[in-house]
Image (spheres, grey):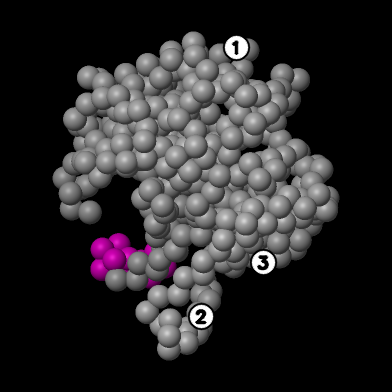
Amino acid sequence: MQLQTRSSVARAAPAACRTRCIKVRSAAHVAGIREEAVERGRNDPASGLSARFVPFKDVQQAKLSGEEYSLDTVVYRSKDGGLLDVYHDMDGLKRFDAAHWKKLFDGRVGTTLWPYGSGVWSKKEWVLPGIGDDDIVSMFEGGTNLFWAERFGREALGMSDLWVKQCGNSHTGSFKDLGMTVLVSQVNRIRKLRPGAISAVGCASTGDTSAALSAYCAAAGIPSIVFLPADKISLAQLVQPIANGALVLSIDTDFDGCMKLIKEVTAETPIYLANSMNSLRLEGQKTAAIEILQQFDWQVPDWVIIPGGNLGNIYAFYKGFKMCQELGLVDRIPRLVCAQAANANPLYTAFKRGWQHYEPVKAQTTFASAIQIGDPVSIDRAILALEDANGIVEEATEEELMDA
């Protein structure tokens, strides 16, 4: 595949501000920014677009059962206990051709126009089309660098065309910001619509999710609660939720134990579940896939490799690529690779068995602590994504992780 790159032009700053230029805006001007965004929304030709929750099994079977829920409803499971998925009005989206979407998305890159300067909200019509701009909680996440790993590709892999999407170049240091801006924005909307419906937002975490949740909740003035496995996360990951004012509970168990506990708590209290079992998160995370296509000038890479722990991200990337294909922006999707740690590899084991049998595992300690998960919530989502993308699963031993 031949890739194109874009040149950048450096513009000289006036001598008085070459060291650092900061544009300071008054509180009144910030309020004006939001008011302008609301007014633009009233005149948006795509304002009639919608999305809703449907059972994930409807997606698996490519047939709607009729069960559906508003995104304003606090619900995490379908009637039969299965996962939910955010289902978009594809007929409505198809009213606009591929050229329209490309021009729209490309025109928002790098802008300060609220909220479209965010890599997530620059695709708002494909994420949460019904949310008001004034409800959005954003730190202008996304828009991360696509790095040409020339030397590593050549010397380590014998490849000349290896690229790394640096999703960790974000406010809290991980791709979780992409999903959390969507989830917390929707919570912000629900709390305005129905005061008292949600008292706080909670998650189980191996570190990154808690950092992202606490940061976005702090920005919105929403209480957050995080359940962390004791002595299993880094100090850098622990500092963030504490600094952001979250209630941090250290539990003597692993991630899977924390996940079981938070599901029980959110089922019995007005605390909103923020783990990727909640499909709102995946709507934000899928924009990284769309962004990759943008950065390749809408050319499709041959392979995309994604680490897998709770397995929501592999499905999110698939969903982003698939929407681009279905709406005509590209003519195919890349093959996907899910990379697991050998010490926490339930998806890899199922793949080697030809998807015939899946069993959770007891995750062992791994240097890749963020994916030390033995019973992933999104196992069915990951299998659907990999099967449709003709994907594969690989594992890395602890020695291989250290060598990398």
Q: Which residues are magenta?
A: 152-162
Q: Which residue is labeled 1 in the image?
A: 80
N-term-proximal mark, 3 vs 1:
1
Helix, strand or loop for disc 1: loop
Q: Name the residue nearer the viewer: 386 or 364.
A: 364
Q: CA distance from mark 3 to mark 2?
A: 17 Å
Look at 29% across and 71% down and name the residue there. Answer: 151
Helix, strand or loop for disc 3: helix
Foreground label between 3 and 1? 3
Foreground label between 3 and 2? 3
Q: CA distance from mark 2 to mark 1?
A: 52 Å
The quarter of the picture where residue 166 lies is: bottom left
Is 345 left or right of 112, judged from the image as shown?
Answer: left
Q: Any magenta on residue 263? A: no
Question: Is there a contact, CB below 8 Å, between mark 3 and mark 2?
Answer: no
Mark sitting on residue 363: none
Look at 51% across and 23% down and name the residue there. Answer: 199
Q: Position of residue 216 (x, y in %)?
A: 47, 41
Is 99 left or right of 276, judged from the image as shown?
Answer: right
Quadrant in the picture for the C terminus: bottom left
Q: Position of residue 155 (x, y in %)?
A: 26, 68
Q: Any magenta on residue 157? A: yes
Q: Which residue is labeled 3 in the image?
A: 107
Q: Name the residue nearer the viewer: 330 or 208.
A: 208
The relative height of residue 193 versus residue 97 in the rendered view (above or below) is: above
The relative height of residue 154 versus residue 205 in the rendered view (above or below) is: below
The relative height of residue 111 versus residue 191 in the rendered view (above or below) is: below
